[in-house]
Image (cartoon, grey):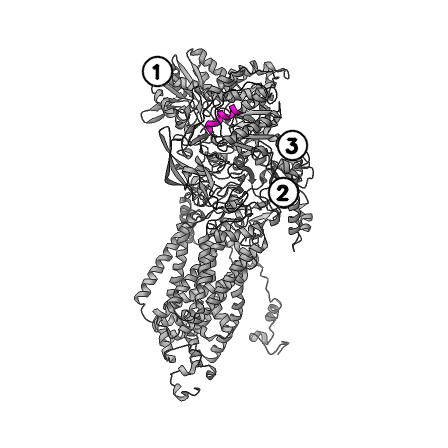
Amino acid sequence: MGNNKNNNVWIGGEHLVNDPSVLESANKEFVELPIVEQMSDDRSMEVTSNRRDFLKYLGFSVGAATVAASCDIPIKKALPYVTKPDTIVPGVANYYASSFVNGGDYCAVLVKTREGRPIKIEGNTLSSITKGGTSARAQASVLSLYDTSRFQQPQKRGDDGWEAVNWADLDKAVMGGIGSNARIVMNTNMSPTAHKAVMDFVAKYPGAKTVTYDPVSSSAILQANEASFGQKTIPNYKFNKAEVIVSFGADFLGTWISPVEYAKDYASGRKIKGVKGAKMSRHIQVEGSMTLTGSNADNRVLVKPSEMGAAIATLYNEIAKATQGSTVAAPTLNAKATSSMSSVAKELLAHPNKSLVVSGSNNFGEQTLVNAINSMLGSYGNTISFANASNQRQGIDAEVQGLISEMESGGVSSLIVWGANPAYDLPNSDKFIAAAEKVALKVSLSGTPDETTALCDYVAPSNHFLESWGDVEAKKGHYSLVQPTISNLFDTRQAESSILTWAGNTQDYHDYLKANWEATAFSMQNDFISFQAFWDSVLHDGVYENAESDYPVSFAGNVNNAASKISKPTTGLEINFFETVNLGGGQYSGNPWLQEMPDPITRCVWGNYLAIPIVFDGDRHWDSKGQFAGLNGNEIKGFADKINVTIDGKVETVTCIRAFGLMNDVVSLAVGYGRTIGNQTGLNIGTNVYPWLSIDANGNTQYYANVSETSGKVGEDELACVQYHHTMGVTGEAEGYDEKVNVDELAISTIARGYQGLLVDRTVIRQGTLNEIDELADKIKHEREHAEHLNSQTLYPYDEFKETIYDQGHHWGLAVDMSACIGCGACQVACVAENNVPVVGKYEVFRHHEMTWLRIDRYFYGDYENPSVVYQPMMCQHCDNAPCENVCPVSATNHSSEGLNQMAYNRCIGTRYCANNCPYKVRRFNWLDYTTADLFPINEPEINGEDLPFGADNLTRMVLNPDVTVRARGVMEKCSFCVQRIQEGKLAAKAEGRRLRDGDVKSACQTACPTGAITFGDTNDKNSAVSKAMGHELAYFNLDEVNTKPSVKYQAKVLNSDEALS
Amino acid sequence: MSAAVSSIREPLITGHKTYHDITEDLIGPTEKAPNFSWVVAFLLSVTLLSFGIFCLIWTFWVGIGSWNLNRTIGWGYDITNFVWWIGIGHAGTLISAILLLFRQKWRTGVNRAAEAMTIFAVMCAGLFPATHTGRPWLDFFMFPYPNTRGPLWVNFNSPLLWDLFAISTYFTVSLLFWYTGLVPDLASVRDRAKGVRRKIYSFVSMGWTGSAKHWQRHEYLSLILAGLATPLVLSVHTIVSFDFATSVIPGWHTTIFPPYFVAGAVFSGFAMVQTLMVITRKILNLNDYITLAHIESMNKVILLTGTIVGTAYLTELFIAWYSQYTYEQYAFFNRATGPYFWSYIGMMGCNLIIPQIFWWKKMRRNIWVTFLMSIFVNIGMWFERFVIIPTTLARDYLPSSWSYYWPSWVEIGIFIGTIGLFFVLYLIFCRVAPVVAAAEIKAILKTAGDQYVGENAKKQTHSHSH
């Protein structure tokens, strides 16, 4: 049997006899096959398929390729540079100094361009006017460059609408038709060189004249200053030098003349540096409905719009009495305001030379009395100066009214409309439209269609400012340049060039501009010897400033005459018309970023809502007050009521919103809505109120009216409001309580009376007054200790983790000073621009699908009839113990070692659990395909009936920031702390071989903020600005005791309220 | 053994059935052409299902934006319905597993249908988490499979992941349990069938011959699965409740949730069993197998669990007040009195107050009251989930973000679709398998010997009478 040891078991006969082949294979139980050799042996490497197989494969491949290729695969064009421009490095942004200018709106800016595309506006810190601050309008202006409604070439009116013409034909036709009595109608134009071009034009056509007006006018200030001081100009207001600021309805933080400048100056007097010895200016706002500025005031004195004159005259008399001046006849003011005015007078008189009174009124008499008050208080030379006076409002309302009469009489040969829209924004635009029939040639220089271009025979479309050369003299002696940051997208020509061409000057406007500068600004300075060096320097810096020395002025106005012209109080319901911080006079209505920016006070978007007063019934219900009772009961479910409002016989249907801070018998409604021609996204949104405006005896447009009739509910509207609950508890009188209680807490429920503490005990908002600032600091300290104690009761070794991870390297944090935040919304639009945040439109906002990463929560507190306001910018808090992170099943949201809560969009499957679990509700879900980044290109929502959805348009998409991923439908997103900027800063530091310095990385919201309320930086750097801000005694974490360990800290809101006025 | 049954106890099977009668009664329906009411019910269910499928396709195509959820309320109908269906899917396993372990022999009358209901309900439930995501085609990211992305792993800290495991385990065990029980009955069907039917049933009955060994293994497997399923009854809804309990949202962040959810699930599950049984016994003439005694037993369970749930509601209110924590207090105050007060009233009324009528025996044994009550409880438990999910989310920490939610037609459509799916599956089940476990019924026939009328009965007549 051989030597088969296991002789009970054998496999076949060979095994049994121990055949050598069996032994060999037994040693190789796991055979290692020599693959290649074997394959070469057995011919398997040879081609075995025959001709027929080849044909089969070929047939299949071709067929498959044909099927695959027949699918419509979008073509993405990416063309390389043939010759790379020196200054452009792909992936690296270039910044150019320029100026945002639109009528009287001005902002010195830096334009960020990527691969030749302007994509973002930043403030220019070298400007002493805006000091690096920006406005929402400036931030959004970059989107207007890519406005799809822009004229793409010169147009001529044909039988069937516009016909394209070439520039030569247009010039010929226009020059042939200008005639002897040409009129150039424009809004405020602050460009000295443009004015020179106009002079050239007038020189060529001697009968020509310019007519300047502003849709929201300060005409009365110009007239009053001319009468009082012989200076037809807006003076230089210095809000930083004022210890007491009294504003009669002037929205100087939002819309009045130079809001970015004033906001910066104002905030500098309002920031609490330290609790010990804290000082603040005092701001008293006299108004009937709440403006952005009024919402920031320490005290508000309520007067009806028609009582504004009475209020000013009463204050004048109080001060005149105290300073032995002569009093004037003042109409009767409501009793409460009368007594308030005497307190206000005492307050002002206690701060001689350090007080400032301003008025937004467009009444000559009222502005004259305000001048007189300022004169008595010694404001001139201290808080107001005519040195470096402002050019930001130049319009005289009477001029445009004169123009209409001239046109009606047939005395105008041609009309050139430059940057104005009189067919829309005049109180009597119907008259203008009718009169335009009598003008033979009407030419518009507008870059986009509007109500006025619709009347014109020719359109000579102007460039966007980002494609133009230009200069701005926003304040006398403060020059800044506008330079192109992209070549013309379309066959357009800047308006100044058109004017020059028609004036017979064929010089390029760039050369003309330089020549003018050489002759003017260059000759005034001594720093540069050659003009080119001077020009290059100014172009680089963007601004050139020439401070004028102040000179005394003395008031020479006639106060008695003025007093006779002030507005007379009326009875009954009055409506206040105001300009919003986003849409202005209507010029910006075609800009979806601004349309979707919530109004700071009502928090509504995409429309102007009639603010109607709210009243507490004493038990547990809020209702609309007076004749509006019963309206808007369904606001918390997202529905608003429509009513008909009749003013001076003209009826309009408006949508209501219940609002705090309105006086009895006062409602308010914004101008600038209801545009009918322009960018499709902005059409027919809200109500056009211009026809309701009236003109007073001095020819000035009045922004209030008596409401003759209001109807009951005539319909329902979808309320596109991002905030349904408005207060952090407001006090009032309620049944069953002896003293004032928080009535909103009683009204918080649908079927029962709430109890005290439901809102105000929340650790969301901390606010106090300057008098009690020590108590406030103590409270914050105590709460912090309490929360730390609670949060230390944990099983998890957080401290250890913090020490080894978060305390190493960078740890990013953000501090918000709620005393400095005025709620203007510039940060929000900046965030949209920086982070490619989609615009979703009215219907989607109504459904609470807004995508904003940064929002500004607005809470009312205090007396409900005259509440105070706190703004809380709310963005991702980048919690170190983030509730969103642990609930994501796929780890799509996670934490970086630098404390960033980061989103991996590709990984996100969209369970929305993170959003549910976020206590701050800052996460935003892509409900629909807002960005066209989706698989299916068919389901993109349109905003407002546009042909191609806003987000899908390739022209619009040029504004996208290439550093930020565009998110697809079904993905969660949120504030990233501008991680792309952090990365950019780190890379720059690394390339330079140095540590990252404080200030190298600034978030988009921080750079946009005009008041410096937001500070971003590395909290591990104990000397950084953000570390210092976070160490402030008034700084607190939002919802500290929830133990989310946020990286954002808020500084409590402090008001310097005057008890006598509250 | 049979003599041990007290005559005070009601017989589990009435109508003097023989073994053959049982076979005829229970297997018979699978062999006959469907009656008119079945056809109508089936067509209606298929219609509902089709609409649901349409709504799902709509959701995939348009996006979750076709639902009315918003930046504040990220879950609404989707997760409400998910939790509701999962709760309904609790009775089957409870009846099969826990009552089996407790030797509650009355369970045999209802366990088959209850288990089937469990499986169908879990299928309906599973649909929601799978389709509520923004990008459902990427749901596979939820599975911890080896991958080339790093590998990128799932987040084991997330209760949603625990859900995935809990529900899939529960579904698997329930399905096995149900099928194990079905095998002998499928064999009975096979034995009577001819042609293709015979082939199909012989395949699905897996060669069952009814040998002693088969029975022994069957019993063991049943016991093992019962042992496995028992902790699952508690774990599934505990883990579902973790979705809420582990969050930081006031009103969700509550330690009472696990027992409260389990009790609620049993409560709603029994109610759904009642709804189905009352109809099934009527339509299939099974009054002798699903007797008033069964209905009364289940009503007792409903009374017990409803009261537990009600106690939990009151405890939550007390704890919220006692905590002195504003957010918690407001969350509960808001549930009861806020804009969704009606859902809270619906919940309290249907779940706590109305079931108290079952303290009266007369009510427990009234078919109409039982049916009506089962509907009330189904509605009440749906409201409970609605109260917990969108109502809580609608008003949490920051008043600025408070919102309001109402479902869109698409969301309602998907819910209706799951009801359609449930009934389509149940109606098919009624046609293809015995809705009452025939084999198990036969096993208990003799436990009430005085009721036994078969051939052997004559020899023992009145042998244990007294």
Point out the residue furthest to the front here: A738
Q: Residues within 10 Å of mark 2 (few under 14, many from 20)?
A: many
Circle 2: element type: strand
Sequence order check, earlier mark of 3 and 2: 3
Q: Nearer the viewer, residue A485 or A523?
A: A523
Viewer-nearest of labels 3 and 1? 3
What is the distance, in whole Å, between disc 3 and disc 1 at their CAs? 60 Å
Q: Which residue is mark 1?
A: A409
Sequence order check, earlier mark of 3 and 1: 3
Viewer-nearest of labels 3 and 2? 3
Amino acid type assigned to the residue bearing label 2 in the image:
Tyr
Amino acid type assigned to the residue bearing label 3 in the image:
Lys
Numbered circle sitting on residue B281: none
Circle 3: element type: loop
x and y percentages locating residue B251 in the rendered image? 53, 54
Q: Which residue is mark 2?
A: A1036
Q: Does the CB distance between marks 3 and 2 fall below 8 Å? A: no
Q: Residues within 10 Å of mark 3 (few under 14, many from 20)?
A: some
x and y percentages locating residue A402 in the rendered image? 40, 17
x and y percentages locating residue B295 in the rendered image? 42, 70
> Does the stretch in magenta take in A308?
yes
Q: Give the extent of the magenta segment.
A: A302-314
Is residue A428 placed above or below A1034 in the rendered structure?
Answer: above
Numbered circle sitting on residue A279: 3
Amino acid type assigned to the residue bearing label 1 in the image:
Ser
A316 sits left or right of A147 in the view: right
x and y percentages locating residue A581 in the rendered image? 50, 31
Q: Nearer the viewer, residue A691 or A1013?
A: A691
The chain holding disc 2 is A
A340 sits left or right of B443 in the view: right
